[in-house]
Amino acid sequence: MHTVVQSSERAASEGRRRAARVAVAGATGYTGQELLRLLSRHSGVTIAAAMSSGAQPGSSAAPRRLPALAHIFSGTITPLDRDALARDTDLVFLALPDKAAAELAPALIEAGVRVIDLSGAFRLRDGAMRARWYPETHELPEGLAYGLTELERPAVAAARLVANPGCYPTATLLPLSPLVASGLLAPDTDIVVDAKSGVSGAGKVPSERTHFSEVHGSVSAYGVFGHRHGAEIEQGVGRAVNFVPHLMPLDRGILSTIYLRLAPGTTEDTLASVYEQSYGGQPFVRLTSSALPEIKHVAHTNFCDIGWRVDASGRAVVVSVIDNLLKGASGQAVQNMNVMLGLDQATGLL
Amino acid sequence: MHTVVQSSERAASEGRRRAARVAVAGATGYTGQELLRLLSRHSGVTIAAAMSSGAQPGSSAAPRRLPALAHIFSGTITPLDRDALARDTDLVFLALPDKAAAELAPALIEAGVRVIDLSGAFRLRDGAMRARWYPETHELPEGLAYGLTELERPAVAAARLVANPGCYPTATLLPLSPLVASGLLAPDTDIVVDAKSGVSGAGKVPSERTHFSEVHGSVSAYGVFGHRHGAEIEQGVGRAVNFVPHLMPLDRGILSTIYLRLAPGTTEDTLASVYEQSYGGQPFVRLTSSALPEIKHVAHTNFCDIGWRVDASGRAVVVSVIDNLLKGASGQAVQNMNVMLGLDQATGLL
Amino acid sequence: MHTVVQSSERAASEGRRRAARVAVAGATGYTGQELLRLLSRHSGVTIAAAMSSGAQPGSSAAPRRLPALAHIFSGTITPLDRDALARDTDLVFLALPDKAAAELAPALIEAGVRVIDLSGAFRLRDGAMRARWYPETHELPEGLAYGLTELERPAVAAARLVANPGCYPTATLLPLSPLVASGLLAPDTDIVVDAKSGVSGAGKVPSERTHFSEVHGSVSAYGVFGHRHGAEIEQGVGRAVNFVPHLMPLDRGILSTIYLRLAPGTTEDTLASVYEQSYGGQPFVRLTSSALPEIKHVAHTNFCDIGWRVDASGRAVVVSVIDNLLKGASGQAVQNMNVMLGLDQATGLL
Amino acid sequence: MHTVVQSSERAASEGRRRAARVAVAGATGYTGQELLRLLSRHSGVTIAAAMSSGAQPGSSAAPRRLPALAHIFSGTITPLDRDALARDTDLVFLALPDKAAAELAPALIEAGVRVIDLSGAFRLRDGAMRARWYPETHELPEGLAYGLTELERPAVAAARLVANPGCYPTATLLPLSPLVASGLLAPDTDIVVDAKSGVSGAGKVPSERTHFSEVHGSVSAYGVFGHRHGAEIEQGVGRAVNFVPHLMPLDRGILSTIYLRLAPGTTEDTLASVYEQSYGGQPFVRLTSSALPEIKHVAHTNFCDIGWRVDASGRAVVVSVIDNLLKGASGQAVQNMNVMLGLDQATGLL
């Protein structure tokens, strides 16, 4: 841990000397493209490499493969190259499948490169849980932090490897964790999390589930009692949560509706105080109180909006929204990078 | 009640002699148009009138105002005319605002015309509740039935006035009522109903909430602790329900996700038996067991699909779907008409 | 041809004796499912088989694979079996890839079974064009008709094999053919067809193009100067057409906007006469005159709506809409079947 | 004109001294909100006022009325106040109805405030045309420029009043103007512009046309031979254009498909040269050549992407895309502001 802090301090001080060299491994998926877009206009870093396992030897101009990024990112997409990453970068974003990330991350941090992993490979701390949900992985390295930025800032600042949270856990833990920590929950309450997500969360690989004609005009529940993000949420709050994700006919965004019972006498104002204490001054958490948030307010932003209602009997309904590709993935990853590099956490994100 | 049964029998016997003369009051809204479409191809009735409060004196060809119905319904849309309804029809569908329906229904049944009311005016039995949620109404007439067809068939058959259920209550009570009635719920369980609806449920009058740009790419919760359909659901199951509706970016369909705890030892098979007992042989309830239903399977149909999952600790997640304009409104209204007229309940609906 | 007519008359007379036995080969794709839905409630036929090349030996209950069809089609999905089709059916719908259809159709008509082919294998009459656009096909059998029902009824009635038109050609030729035939076009006019289609026209196999996140919130042109449906349209009108299809973020429906110049003095009324002469009395063509049609008016129906505007200088804009899975595929196929069997062409389609 | 240039130079030199004070009149509509979002993160200006004709006397916190802008714009929304605008600002954006803009603009420029008008009031130069399409307006003031930035930069730089182009004209004139100017069009060619737009272009006021249920799953043509943007396009190219807009089921974006004939021998490469000459080095025009652009590539950006195909007979299909709220309205308005203030035209827009 000692070394890690040093490395963090060194990075931060280097950040003042010169822009950090960052790379994206897995640059052509949805989260990879968002990373390129965000990093291209970020004032504090330079993009040292944009790699894709599917890229041809040699390299190809990014705009040809990623037309949305023309005039934004003018670099090239090169094949995945571990040595080049280890040699030429200060920090690498892994936007890769779980297994590939599990293999690549330890090698990079071994080489002194800091890593932000957007896969699920390092999110679950408990070995048995990890073995259940991410069977192709592996031990956890030292210097690992869970990158829910607002709640883990010091750990992220010092980390060699950040496990960037899942989209559903981000949307759920930001509103839920302060409540659980506050001790305001009724002792025997169930916690139900009914989450609604857009399709981009399923990634770019075509499947029947992501076929337009299967999603348009429809809504469906999936993963009942068996979604890996449920395990990540339960890890975050340290208790059982009944988490059910639903697929919605939209591209970007998650709305998480949380149902629970509070201790007698708890009011909407009580919750306002709890949230204000947790998130007052945080640039990316917006508290909307009893005016419940909607996905359109946060789409294409790094915000998480949180609203809540409490009735006289202590039943609470908490609603939160994020853009799953930004605060739920690439935006929060850049936010974590800012923290790791000692920059203002909002740099390049507003 | 005696008279009512006679009237019902007379109607049924007349139904064998000649096609019943039916009318739609409020023919140009979304539910009114669906009624015209269904009734036009119904083999057992003739459309005696299609009225709209906004129609010009004289009458106008329906296809000009309702281009989707050209070559389907070739009649005219005439101004609302209580006397004509009382004089020339056997049964009237009211697809009107609550207040208009509350005024018109008693006059019609007084005149011996049977009524199926698609508004909310007569859904709540308790006077205080009705005064809270439908303040511009009114006493309940005799011969009233609640038209959740599968669970109320005998009452519907005999009724002079059928209160057609709300869309959310239909989607929720069909899966929930048999469970509550079975006695399988854990005694102290909360019941959470997280419902997701398309926009057509909000009706045809333009508003900020129904503006395409406000709904597309978004999801929002509304009516927390204060939606009239919550009261209707609680009436149906006789206990508290935490009902939260959500607006989805699609046109037609409701998916209702129900969370509750079951008595120890209850399994998915137990629920299968309960549902089979309630709905086996019913043409419009389809039990999908652990394969959860999706809105696209029921859009543009009168089906209600119900699926369920139970875990080892007794937590249950029940998912149901309907088309809000059909099983949640006009389809169920025609199903009720079939029952009232002594026809096969599926006539004109498959 | 003589034999064909006899066979047609025999079929028609048999149709009066008993319901024709029909089969769907390729029952699990989008058009196959629509066929099963339509045929299940059709009063004049019985479904003798529903086959799929992907079905397991033995057979599986359809509702398990096709949950939308539960309580509608209760049969089984069996593996593709040419002999069974030849032996046990009177008429077969081919909802298969072009190559499979090109192989199967001749064998079936050889065995005396009539065929309606929804693929493109037999649509182009010219051998060179067919070789260009459908290279894996093949000679044309005798007794072939092009199944644009309204314009080819006598040929369809007598046919052994009907090439069911493509969706874009259906949407385009119904409005365009009468104009060309009328001689009202300005001699040197270009014909531009800007067509907009929903995604289901691309079929059920997932691809990047049909990925929800690629289509939602987007519009794109494709196939410029090189779409096989362009060749089919040009065949239909016998002259060059600049046809450009576009992919829209909706599931079902095509809107075709046709731009051309008319001979001096031609008015909207002139066009009304032309269309009335071609389609007056036709159940599935609705003429909307200067009130231009919209996809929502025809979605989930077999209608083709046609509207038109003409300015003082003779420029015309003609707009037509269909549901690509119904009038553009399965609905028109059933309409053709009705004609082949001597039934009212609207049977089972209104 | 002399004065204007002085005023422009003074503004530019002041821009170096201090950030220009800008205001948005009409801050709560869709374009007004986009302006606030863009200006809030713009490094070269300060927002002096955000006004709305519907605002209450006194003022209200913007985030309450515009929750999407919380943590972005923390100012207040105040009632429209002409004197305050004249007194306290250097430049005002008018995002108001045509009539209100026609009245306000002259008063402001009289007071020495520069104006960028997003309404249609000052777009048409010809008095008769203006009287036809914008009857409630009015004379044109001196110092007026048409704000199609890439083609009118010098005029915009010097202008007191910029008429920001319509969304359809922007999407159409950027690809079409260089072709017309190049002299490459076949002499007698028709020009057909088939434009497809999202709903936000219709503004925020709810209507039947913008009702979600009317738009979802549908496509429709409108304004044939009679859309004011057609007049603006014809003014831009100086010849007749057959412009037909279509409404698509998406929120943001326009795709314009342009059909015309080129002089014999013109190829795709010829067009590449023409476009390169017009737009090479322009930050917001991206030339995609034969890979046709799609709306998703430009949504939420200020880009206009242009692609083209030419066949051997000289038929050309040119496709362009923009985000109607950005390059088609607020983005181009800020781009114009940058030019007027002597800033890099991309400031705050990438």
Image: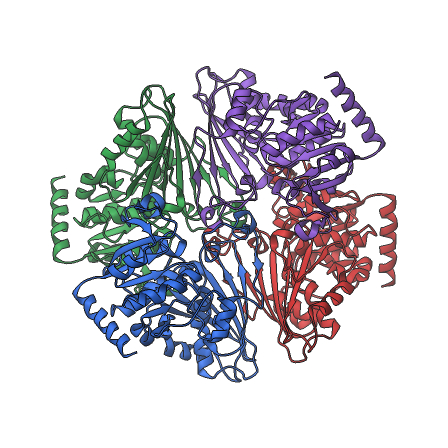
Chain colours: A green, B purple, C red, D blue
Q: Residue at 43% across / 28% down in the picture? A: B225
| Image vertical order of residue B261 relative to residue A131, above or below | above
Question: Quarter holding the N terminus of chain A?
Answer: top left
Image location of residue A271, percent across then percent down: 30, 29
Q: Is residue A39 left or right of residue C291?
A: left
Q: Is residue A163 visible?
A: yes
B27 vs D278, nearest the viewer? B27
Q: Quadrant of residue A318?
A: top left
Image location of residue B285, percent across then percent down: 63, 30
Image location of residue A329, percent across then percent down: 33, 46
Q: Quadrant of residue C179?
A: bottom right
| Image vertical order of residue D77 relative to residue B325, above or below | below
Q: Is residue B229 left or right of residue A1?
A: right
Q: How many marks?
A: 0
Q: Residue at 18% across / 39% down in the picture? A: A154
Image location of residue D335, percent across then percent down: 32, 66
| Image vertical order of residue C72 relative to residue B313, above or below | below
C61 vs D48, nearest the viewer? D48
Q: Quadrant of residue A47?
A: bottom left
B326 vs A139, nearest the viewer? B326
Q: Is residue B50 left or right of residue C56?
A: right
